[in-house]
Amino acid sequence: MPVAWKFGSVASIGWEDAFVARYSSDGALLWFRHFGAPGALAHAVGVAAGPGGIAATGTFRTAIDFGEGPVTPAGKDDVFVVMLDPATGETRWSATLGDAQWDRAGDVAFAPDGDVVVTGEIGSKLLLARFDGAGIEQWSKLTGYVFGSASEWPAVSDL
């Protein structure tokens, strides 16, 4: 069933979809992208604009298509990062991180050299990962423990 909002209506692809929208400085909608699949759960929680485009991160629970074909989570929930073309909203690249546990995205930002940095939680460990402009994972670090589990506590939420 389409969801009505200020700029029109959007039909959900899945049960809960992640979305990213870009607006002009005067508030006009330039483009709208949403990611989902029938029965899928996805939440976008962080977005950043930088030299490589517009990066978004979030969490997904079931097979989903970020614009390059369906991907399946490794576990219960996994982290995604997707790079969108700033002019069109088309996917330039996407990547996922996760294990068999509940994983949660935190935030996304651009490093001074244009790489994309993502925070979150994998299992009950804090996540920090870096991707280059082509979406190739440069490194990822898991450190410390979060009290409880990702389903109960928020991950690192700001960069």
Image (cartoon, rainbow, N blue to C red):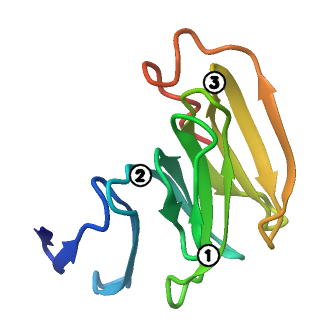
Q: Which of the two labelled residues, at mark 2 and mark 1, occupies the earlier sequence position?
A: 2
Q: Are marks 1 and 3 in contact (CB under 8 Å)?
A: no
Few, some or many residues within 10 Å of mark 1 (<14, 14–19, 20+) = few
- CA distance separating discs 1 and 3: 26 Å
- CA distance separating discs 2 and 3: 18 Å
Say which residue label 2 marks: 42
Say which residue label 3 marks: 123
Image coordinates of residue 65 in percent, x first then y, are 51, 68
Q: Secondary structure at mark 3?
A: loop
Res 131 quadrant in image: bottom right
Work out whether residue 134 or residue 12 is closer to the camera in this orientation and state it. Answer: 12
Task: Identify the residue at image location x=65%, y=55%.
Answer: 109
Going by the image, does 123 lie left or right of 131? left
Res 114 quadrant in image: bottom right
Few, some or many residues within 10 Å of mark 3 (<14, 14–19, 20+) = many
Going by the image, does 7 lie left or right of 66? left
Which of the labelled discs sits on residue 55, or is there none? Answer: none
Q: Secondary structure at mark 2?
A: strand
Few, some or many residues within 10 Å of mark 2 (<14, 14–19, 20+) = many
Image coordinates of residue 103 in percent, x first then y, are 57, 33
Work out whether residue 81 or residue 73 is closer to the camera in this orientation and state it. Answer: 73
Say which residue label 1 marks: 68
Going by the image, does 37 lie left or right of 76? left
